[in-house]
Structures are given as C-alpha cells and as structure tokens.
Amino acid sequence: MTFKPAVIDFAIVAAFVIYSVTIGLRSRKKASTGLNEYFLAGRSVSGTRAGFSMAATQFAADTPLLVMGLIAMGGIFSLWRLWIYGLAFLMMGFILAAAWRRSGILTDAELVMTRYSARGALMLRGLKAIYYGTIINCVVMAFVLIAAVRIFEIFLPWNDWLPAGMYSATADAIAATGLVLSSGVTGLDPVIATTNNVLSIAAMLAFVALYSTTGGLRSVIATDVVQLALMLAGTAIYAWLAVGAAGGLADIPDRLVDIYGQATAERFLSFVPQAGDALMPFLVIIALQWFFQMNSDGTGYLAQRTMACRDHQQARLAAVVFTMTQVVVRSLLWLLIGIALLIVYPFDASAPLTEAGIGERELTFALGMDELLPVGARGLMLTGMLAALASTLDTHLNWGASYWSNDLYKGIWVEGVRGRAAGRKELLLAARLSNIVILGIALAIMANLQSIQTAWQISLLFGAGTGAVLVLRWLWERINLWCEVAAIAISLILAPILIYTVDAEWLRLLLMSAVSLVVVILVAYVAPATNQGKLVEFYQRVRPPGAWRRTAIAAGDDPARGNADLRRDLAGLIACAASVYSWLIGCGWLLLDSDRVVQGIAAIAVGLAACPVWLKSLRE
C-alpha cells in the first residue's frame, strides 16, 4: 500500500515548503549578526509565539504513533504517561521561567558557569553539552526519524516518481551499504522501501537545513507557528472523519462493546485507573516521570524558547500557552482518532501485545490517513505530518548546534584551550557544521530501534537520573557542581545495568530516581560548597525562588523572599494544573461518555474557577 497524491495534495505540500524556505532566507541577515540572534532570536519573542513553537516541536511525527500504541495497550488512561508532563511544563513556567529569562545565558549548559565556582565548571559545561546536545538529543531524533520512516514509506513512493535508471542506480548504491530502513507496511521489497526512505530523509533534512541553518531560531519559530496551525487543522479534519468512519460519537461506546466486550470497552474509555495487578506500577511511573526526566526544569529547547522571550512575564505565558495547546487541544484530537481507529482497525485485545503488535497499532494512524481522508484532506494532513517532523528536526538541530558552537567550540576549545576570543563567522560555521555529526549519530541510533516505545523508554531512563538536580539547583543554595556531575554519572552507569537486569519499567524508573536523588543530596552536604561570592552574584542576577536564606542575607536581601516567591508560584502552578486537567477530562467526558455529561460540565467549571489564581500569578 502506497499513497497516490493528487495535484492538490502536491500543491499544499509545495506551498508549505516555499513558505518555510522563504522565511529562512528572509531571516538570514539578522541571524548572521551573532549567536544571540541566531539561537535566541535577539530575546524578542512574544510568549504566545514561543509557546506555540514549543507545542509545534512536541507535535512531532512520532507522537501520534506513540498515542495509538498507548491506547491499544491501556486505553485512554494510559495517555496520562504523556499528560502528566503538563506538571513539568507548568513548573517551568510558574517557578523557573523568570529565573531562566533573567539568567542572561545562551544555553542551559552555560548556566554552570554562572551557578558554580569549582574549577570543574568548564568540564561540567562540556559534559552537559555532550550529554544533552549529543546523547539525549540524538536519541530523541532517532525515534522521531523512526516515525518519519513509517510515514515516508506510505506517502512518498519515490520508485513511482523518479526515472527508472536514476532510481535503480540509487537503490544499488544504498543496497551496497547494507542499510535496511523498512517498516514493511507497504509490502514493498526491503531494498525499494529502504531506498524510498533514504531519499525521503535526505529531502527532508535538506529542506529543514535550508531554512533553519540560514535563519536561526527566528525562522524556526516563524515556521513553527504556521506548522502548528497546519497540524491542528489537519488533525481536526482527521479526527472528524475517523469518528464518522467509526459510527459517530454517540455510537462509539456501543461499537467498542460489540467488538471488544464490556470490560475491555470500559477500559479503553476510562480516564481514571481501574483496579488490577498493573495499576500500582503504572501509578508509580506517572508519579515519577514528570519530575525525574531530562527536561524537568525546561533544560533543552524549552529553556531556549523561554530565554528567547522578551521578558519574564512573556516567558511564563509561553509555558502556559504551550501546556494548554499540548495537553488539552492536541490530546483531545488524538484521543478521538485513537479511539475511533480501535473500531475502524480492530485487533485481538485479549492477546498480549508484543513489540511487533505495538508497532502495528502505531501504524494505524498512517493507515487511517491513507484510507479515510479524501483528496485535499490527505494533502493537508500529510503536510501537517511533514510540518511536525520539520518542526522537531529544526528545533533539535538548532538546539544541538547551540551546545556545539557556544559551549564546546567557543567556551572550551577557543576560549579555554586556545585562549583567544572566537569570531562571529567561525562560530556560525561551527554551528552549521555540527549538524552533520548530530544527524549521523541519530541515524546510527535509529537503525537499532525497532519501536518508538523502546526508544521512548530508554530516553526516560537516561533522563530519570538527572531530573531532580536540574530543579534543585534553582531552588536550593547547597547544590554544587559535583551534584550535577554525580547525577550524570549515575545516569550513564546505572541505566545500562537496569536495562539488562530489571525487566519491570516502573522498577527501573523508581530505582534510577531514588538512587540519583539520594546521591545528589549526599553530595550536596559532602562535596565542597559553591563560593559565597559566586552564589551572591547568581542570586542577584537571577533572583531564584526557594531555599536561598544564607545567600539572600549575604546579598542584603530579605531572607524570606525566596520561600515566599516559591509559595506564590506553587499556588499558580496548582491552579493552572487544575484548569488544564479539569478541561481535558471534562471535554473528554462530554465527547465520549454520555453518562458523564453533568460531571463533564462540572469539571470544566472547576477549571474556569481556578483561572483568576493563575492569571494573577502570570502578571507578577
């Protein structure tokens, strides 16, 4: 099975490509003025645009496939594994966004130079640049590219488009490398499928590089906003048609019962946990992973967007816009598609889902695009998926390049080793060349991952070891440089041991999180403390919330200010979380459960009642 695009489908994709490239070329002059403009858009971005850019990046082409697999495994409730991250996003916004914005740094790795005084600060800066900018970054890109291969294989049949001689020569050259990139969904010969996928990846990367490496973050954000609009529009149309193919909203519950039985149908549609042997492990996972994860304080491209905002209030707004779009709007659309496809493409829910079975369920999203959407709608949805992939790739390329050019090349090699100042042109060249290495590593990892689920779980485990210290360094003055080194070391050492010795995912996360937290606290008391002068300088620049009593006194500030700010910000976080999850559950009940109309309306009302609290916090 392959997609046969009509002229209008090609026209929609072409319009998107032309727009994105044009934006990149128009932003080139500004992006070339320096790293601050190239990576942070001159710190002039509005909170709304920054939030939409974050949402576009996390709308990645792999995520809807992941959602299909999760719904098949555990129903709607299993999506809490994604929704729970909303707490981390809101924590970043209400508690940490202002501190990120006031820090005045270019990358999160650079933060160690302003936060710590030990001689190893430069070493840690380089270590974090490698860990986040290469290891974590490339693992994430790998499972995004896995999803891309599954989409490309269906919708981009290069063997039908290219001249036979040109295609045959290309296929022979790729086959000689021994590379296999085929999902098997189209039934094509593996050599043909691999060739198609390689050509698609090459075309996509060339397209993304054309606008992201020339225009920097300004062009990335400008295209992200349009990409998000395309993705939401295409997904909304897909949801409407998928629900129609499943019999309509009113008939979905009964049809699920007819296909899967009463108990399984209730499990598929439940937003709340059901008793069972797997309940406690699942609750442990969602309780831990929002905090013990690689981006717990926004580290990475979320912090990059936050620091690109024009002031700390806009930085807070960005996190709220992002969370609302991500957790409420996007989730409701994918939820409808996922439930509808359980009816359109039924499976044996009584049999255990294997890795291959999960992969098959993930692919129903692409199959539905091909079989349920009419001409034009398919082009819009395909453009949306390509936009999702482009948004994720351009963000990770720009983010990864910021580590390589600002931290590894400028901070360590040029200034640290060579002892000279780095020129503007050489820094921009270093940023652009680093993309090649990052992509090569990501492609190598991709070839060894059979399922998006596998990559996602590995990513979670690596991140669990560093999550606590990333937040604590902002909230507690005792955290020192060696706390971060210890957390990264524990993550790298313990992760492979747990992967090979512990089968239960929840136990892996629990052990990694607990061991890391204990080690960080012990090191905070045992290792040499950060120089008081350095802490005062950091405190006066950033004004962090939390336990900074001694530093506040040394800085001549009110020692109670930090804890007071933290209490205020926590109130805003809790209130906004109440709105987000009340609206999500309330709208979900109204859409899929006619017996819970009253509860759905009540949940939406609770969310509205909480608004004044968090809106006030946003303005402070």
Image: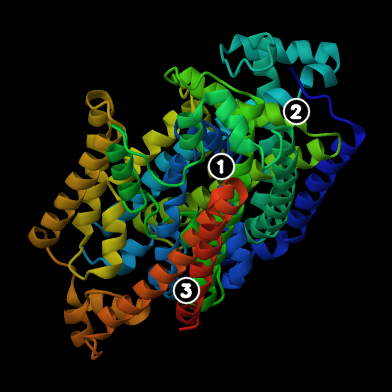
CA distance separating discs 1 and 2: 33 Å
CA distance separating discs 3 and 2: 42 Å
In this rendering, would 199 be left or right of 138? Answer: right
- Residue 332 in percent (x, y) is at 59, 49
Question: Residue 362 lies in what quarter of the image?
Answer: top right
Figure quadrant of the C terminus: bottom left
**Mark 1 is on which residue type?**
Asn
Q: Which residue lies at the image location 48% right of the left edge and 69% below the top edge? A: 606
The residue that disc 3 covers is 610
Extreme-front residue of the structure: 595
Q: What label sits on residue 370 in the rendered view?
A: 2
Question: Residue 144 lies in what quarter of the image?
Answer: top right
- Residue 112 in percent (x, y) is at 32, 62
**Mark 3 is on which residue type?**
Ala
In this rendering, would 87 be left or right of 556? Answer: right
> Helix, strand or loop at disc 3?
loop
Q: Is residue 364 above or below residue 397?
A: above
Cβ atoms at labels 1 and 3 below 8 Å apart: no
